[in-house]
Image (cartoon, helix red, strand yellow):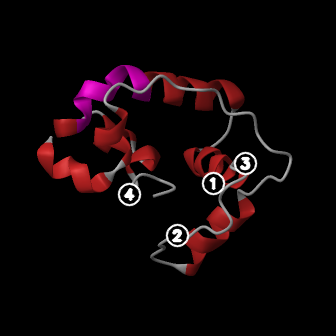
Amino acid sequence: SAFLQGLLLSHTHQYSGKFTRWKPLWDNFNGWLSNKKISPISACINYVYSQKDIDQVIIGVMSQAQLEEILNSIDTANLQIPEFNIEDKELLINPSNWSFL
């Protein structure tokens, strides 16, 4: 999921329940967003577009406004996204593993 099922878009979910183990990661990510003055949507969608081996992106939206926000966030200048150290990466990046947390 480009947005980790919305997790990367919501500070509330990042710091609650089973995702608290990644608090340092959330802090780094949110600090980087703040420093660069970009939205989480822009960071996520541009990260996906920067991946050479990804040809298509499937996103879910609840309104036309959400779709327009996502499309307007695409920056073909290829935003330089840092490499974040992710502990237990497979547990986090694959939502099907979240039930095991």
Mark 2 or mark 4, which has the lower sequence index? 4
Q: Identify the secondary structure beneath mark 2.
A: loop
Label 2 sits on residue: 59
Gap between marks 4 and 1 measured at Cα: 13 Å
At label 4, which amino acid type do we have? Gln
Q: In this view of the protein, which residue sits in the foreground, 87 or 46?
A: 87
Mark 2 or mark 1, which has the lower sequence index? 1
* Magenta extent: 19-26
Q: Residue at x 18, y 38 (%)?
A: 18
Label 3 sits on residue: 50
Q: Is residue 39 on the magenta stretch?
A: no
Query: What's the mark number on residue 5?
Result: 4
Say if 54 sits above or below 11 in the image.
below
Label 1 sits on residue: 45
- Residue 12 visible in the snapshot: no
Mark 3 or mark 4, which has the lower sequence index? 4
Mark 4 or mark 1, which has the lower sequence index? 4
At label 3, which amino acid type do we have? Ser
At label 1, which amino acid type do we have? Ile
Q: Residue at x 34, y 50 (%)?
A: 94
Residue that sits furthest to the right in the current view: 77
Q: In this view of the protein, which residue sits in the foreground, 82 or 26?
A: 82
- Mark 1 is surrounded, within 10 Å at the Cα level, by few (under 14), some (14 to 19) or many (20 or more) other residues, namely some
Query: What's the mark number on residue 22?
Result: none
Gap between marks 3 and 4 measured at Cα: 19 Å
Gap between marks 3 and 1 measured at Cα: 9 Å
